Image (cartoon, rainbow, N blue to C red):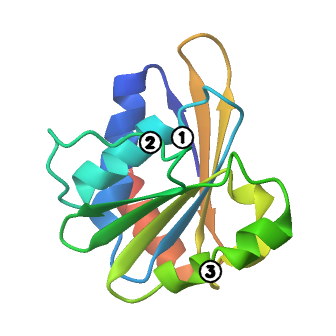
Amino acid sequence: MRIISKSDAATVEIGKRVGHILKGGDAVALSGTLGSGKTWLTKGIGIGLGVNPDEVISSPSFSLVNEYEGRCLLYHIDLYRLDKQNDITLLGLDDYFHERSVVVVEWAERSPGLFPSGFIKVKIEILDDNERAIEIDSDDPAISARLKKGLAI
Protein backbone atom coordinates (compact mmCIF):
# COMPACT_ATOMS: atom_id res chain seq x y z
CA MET A 1 0.00 0.00 0.00
CA ARG A 2 1.37 3.42 -0.94
CA ILE A 3 0.35 6.56 0.92
CA ILE A 4 1.52 10.10 0.20
CA SER A 5 2.20 12.29 3.24
CA LYS A 6 2.33 16.03 2.66
CA SER A 7 3.73 17.04 6.08
CA ASP A 8 5.30 15.79 9.30
CA ALA A 9 1.87 16.06 10.95
CA ALA A 10 0.34 13.89 8.21
CA THR A 11 3.12 11.32 8.71
CA VAL A 12 2.28 11.23 12.44
CA GLU A 13 -1.41 10.68 11.54
CA ILE A 14 -0.49 7.76 9.26
CA GLY A 15 1.58 6.34 12.11
CA LYS A 16 -1.40 6.66 14.48
CA ARG A 17 -3.54 4.63 12.10
CA VAL A 18 -0.84 1.96 11.93
CA GLY A 19 -0.48 2.02 15.74
CA HIS A 20 -4.22 1.50 16.22
CA ILE A 21 -4.13 -1.81 14.37
CA LEU A 22 -0.92 -3.17 15.91
CA LYS A 23 -0.98 -5.72 18.69
CA GLY A 24 1.57 -7.44 20.88
CA GLY A 25 3.99 -9.53 18.85
CA ASP A 26 3.96 -7.20 15.82
CA ALA A 27 7.20 -5.81 14.40
CA VAL A 28 7.69 -2.85 12.07
CA ALA A 29 10.82 -2.50 9.93
CA LEU A 30 11.37 1.11 8.85
CA SER A 31 13.72 2.10 6.05
CA GLY A 32 14.41 5.42 4.39
CA THR A 33 17.16 8.01 4.13
CA LEU A 34 18.08 10.50 6.84
CA GLY A 35 15.25 12.98 7.32
CA SER A 36 12.66 10.88 5.54
CA GLY A 37 10.27 10.76 8.51
CA LYS A 38 10.93 7.44 10.24
CA THR A 39 10.81 9.00 13.70
CA TRP A 40 7.69 11.04 12.86
CA LEU A 41 5.95 7.83 11.80
CA THR A 42 7.11 6.13 15.01
CA LYS A 43 5.69 9.01 17.08
CA GLY A 44 2.32 8.36 15.47
CA ILE A 45 2.61 4.60 16.01
CA GLY A 46 3.28 5.27 19.69
CA ILE A 47 0.23 7.51 20.00
CA GLY A 48 -1.87 4.87 18.20
CA LEU A 49 -0.61 2.31 20.74
CA GLY A 50 -1.72 4.53 23.61
CA VAL A 51 1.60 6.11 24.54
CA ASN A 52 0.94 9.47 26.19
CA PRO A 53 1.05 12.02 23.33
CA ASP A 54 2.95 14.42 25.64
CA GLU A 55 5.74 11.87 26.05
CA VAL A 56 8.51 12.76 23.63
CA ILE A 57 9.22 9.89 21.26
CA SER A 58 12.63 10.62 19.83
CA SER A 59 15.14 8.70 17.78
CA PRO A 60 17.17 6.38 20.00
CA SER A 61 20.32 6.89 17.91
CA PHE A 62 22.60 7.06 20.93
CA SER A 63 20.73 4.77 23.33
CA LEU A 64 19.82 2.27 20.55
CA VAL A 65 16.54 1.26 22.27
CA ASN A 66 13.81 3.40 23.85
CA GLU A 67 10.85 1.84 25.68
CA TYR A 68 7.38 3.34 26.00
CA GLU A 69 4.25 2.20 27.86
CA GLY A 70 0.97 2.04 25.99
CA ARG A 71 -1.60 -0.74 25.66
CA CYS A 72 1.49 -2.87 25.09
CA LEU A 73 5.19 -2.09 25.34
CA LEU A 74 6.68 -0.18 22.42
CA TYR A 75 10.36 -0.79 21.79
CA HIS A 76 11.81 1.81 19.42
CA ILE A 77 15.17 0.61 18.10
CA ASP A 78 17.55 2.59 15.90
CA LEU A 79 20.30 0.75 14.02
CA TYR A 80 21.79 3.87 12.37
CA ARG A 81 25.04 3.80 14.35
CA LEU A 82 25.55 0.07 13.83
CA ASP A 83 26.97 -1.00 10.50
CA LYS A 84 28.13 -4.54 11.14
CA GLN A 85 25.70 -7.45 11.38
CA ASN A 86 27.87 -8.94 14.14
CA ASP A 87 27.40 -5.79 16.28
CA ILE A 88 23.65 -6.07 15.89
CA THR A 89 23.63 -9.80 16.67
CA LEU A 90 25.72 -9.31 19.83
CA LEU A 91 23.19 -6.81 21.22
CA GLY A 92 20.55 -9.53 21.55
CA LEU A 93 17.83 -7.38 20.03
CA ASP A 94 15.75 -10.45 19.26
CA ASP A 95 14.88 -10.54 22.99
CA TYR A 96 12.61 -7.52 22.43
CA PHE A 97 10.32 -9.44 20.08
CA HIS A 98 7.61 -11.06 22.21
CA GLU A 99 3.83 -11.21 22.50
CA ARG A 100 3.64 -8.30 24.97
CA SER A 101 5.48 -5.81 22.77
CA VAL A 102 5.46 -3.99 19.47
CA VAL A 103 8.94 -3.41 18.06
CA VAL A 104 9.67 -0.58 15.62
CA VAL A 105 13.15 -0.59 14.09
CA GLU A 106 14.64 2.36 12.21
CA TRP A 107 17.32 1.55 9.62
CA ALA A 108 15.93 -2.00 9.49
CA GLU A 109 17.79 -2.74 6.26
CA ARG A 110 20.97 -3.01 8.37
CA SER A 111 19.71 -6.26 9.89
CA PRO A 112 17.24 -8.05 7.62
CA GLY A 113 17.50 -11.32 9.58
CA LEU A 114 16.40 -9.66 12.82
CA PHE A 115 12.66 -9.76 12.17
CA PRO A 116 10.17 -12.54 12.91
CA SER A 117 7.98 -13.81 10.10
CA GLY A 118 5.03 -11.62 9.18
CA PHE A 119 6.65 -8.33 10.09
CA ILE A 120 5.47 -5.04 8.61
CA LYS A 121 7.80 -3.39 6.10
CA VAL A 122 7.68 0.38 5.76
CA LYS A 123 9.77 2.27 3.23
CA ILE A 124 9.69 6.05 3.25
CA GLU A 125 10.88 7.99 0.22
CA ILE A 126 11.45 11.75 0.14
CA LEU A 127 9.57 13.27 -2.81
CA ASP A 128 10.27 16.94 -1.96
CA ASP A 129 10.79 19.15 1.12
CA ASN A 130 7.43 18.21 2.66
CA GLU A 131 6.11 15.26 0.68
CA ARG A 132 6.86 11.61 1.43
CA ALA A 133 5.80 8.37 -0.24
CA ILE A 134 5.19 5.72 2.41
CA GLU A 135 5.03 2.08 1.29
CA ILE A 136 3.54 -0.28 3.88
CA ASP A 137 3.39 -4.03 3.36
CA SER A 138 3.57 -7.43 5.05
CA ASP A 139 3.96 -10.91 3.63
CA ASP A 140 1.51 -12.22 6.25
CA PRO A 141 -2.05 -12.19 4.79
CA ALA A 142 -3.69 -11.57 8.20
CA ILE A 143 -1.45 -8.58 8.92
CA SER A 144 -1.93 -7.27 5.36
CA ALA A 145 -5.70 -7.43 5.89
CA ARG A 146 -5.39 -5.49 9.18
CA LEU A 147 -3.24 -2.88 7.43
CA LYS A 148 -5.68 -2.47 4.52
CA LYS A 149 -8.61 -2.10 6.91
CA GLY A 150 -6.80 0.29 9.26
CA LEU A 151 -5.28 2.43 6.51
CA ALA A 152 -8.28 2.59 4.18
CA ILE A 153 -8.82 6.18 3.14
- Give the structural element (helix, strand or loop) at label 3: loop
**Residue at image mark 1:** 38
* Cα–Cα span, label 3 and label 2: 25 Å
Left-right relation of 117 to 47: right
Residue for point 42% across, 33% down: 11
Q: Say if mark 2 contacts mark 1, CB within 8 Å.
A: yes
Q: Position of residue 32 (x, y in %)?
A: 69, 39
Q: Does residue 46 lie above or below 59 as drawn?
A: below
* Residue found at the very far top of the displayed protein: 129
**Residue at image mark 2:** 41
Q: Earlier in the sequence, mark 3 or mark 1?
A: 1
Left-right relation of 95 to 112: left
> Which of the two residues, 4 or 99, is positioned nearer the viewer here?
99
Left-right relation of 24 to 114: left
* Cα–Cα span, label 3 and label 1: 23 Å
**Residue at image mark 3:** 92
Q: Say if mark 3 contacts mark 2, CB within 8 Å.
A: no
Name the residue type under label 1. Lys
